[in-house]
Image: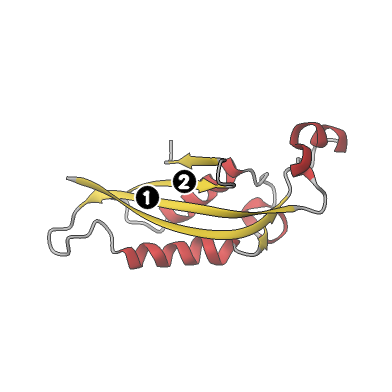
């Protein structure tokens, strides 16, 4: 029997959407206000969903404390109150769009989880704009 466990988290971060290889005019045309050279920020909300079999000994799919610790070390400590473009190595050459951020988070957490688990990450950039990634 497969069950999915969800853990919510949040982090606050600044970013700028732009491509170094494009002109200022093209960046402005494509990314608009999100291309502000002085950056802008979001209060990101994230849901990590782990699916697996229920362990007959513990009754858990995954110990939620384990998931909480992974999210803290791999996401919150790495991204919270950071400028994604300047402070987070994964975005030195990767545009920190919500789509790219969710893939980076997924890859960081998936690498630390037991391979028996399926993982899905949902990332809210605003209450109405969010993305989901499950490795596909």
Image check: 57 left or right of 101?
Answer: left
Could you say where residue 52 lies in the image, as x and y percent from the top left? 25, 49
Mark 1 touching mark 2, by CB under 8 A? yes
Give me the residue at 78% from left, 37% from top. Answer: 32
Measure how far apart labels 1 and 2 are at the Cα level. 8 Å
Image check: 16 left or right of 88?
Answer: right
Nearer to me, 124 or 25: 124
Residue 7 circle label: none
Q: Secondary structure at mark 1?
A: strand
Nearer to me, 39 or 19: 39
Q: How is the image coloured?
A: secondary structure
Could you say where residue 26 lies in the image, as x and y percent from the top left? 82, 32
Q: Quadrant of residue 8?
A: bottom left
Q: Which residue is mark 2?
A: 122
Q: Quadrant of residue 11?
A: bottom right
Q: Which residue is mark 1?
A: 49
Could you say where residue 48 lies in the image, as x and y percent from the top left? 41, 52
> Compared to 37, does 28 lie above or below?
above
In which quadrant is the C terminus drawn? top left
User: Farthest left residue?
Assistant: 56
Could you say where residue 99 lies in the image, as x and y percent from the top left? 57, 41
Give me the residue at 45% from left, 61% from top. Answer: 71
């Amino acid at each position: 029997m497969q069950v999915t466990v969800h853990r919510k988290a949040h982090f606050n971060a600044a970013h700028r959407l732009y491509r170094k290889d494009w002109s200022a005019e093209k960046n402005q045309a494509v990314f608009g206000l999100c291309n502000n050279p002085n950056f802008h920020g979001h209060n990101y909300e994230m849901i990590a969903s782990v699916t697996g079999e229920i362990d007959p000994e513990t009754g858990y799919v995954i110990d939620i404390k384990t998931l909480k610790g992974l999210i803290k070390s791999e996401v919150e400590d790495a991204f919270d109150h950071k400028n994604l473009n300047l402070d987070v190595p994964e975005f030195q050459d990767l545009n920190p769009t919500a789509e790219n951020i969710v893939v980076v988070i997924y890859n960081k957490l998936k690498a630390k989880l037991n391979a028996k688990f399926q993982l899905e990450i949902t990332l809210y950039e605003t209450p109405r704009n969010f993305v989901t990634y499950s490795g596909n």
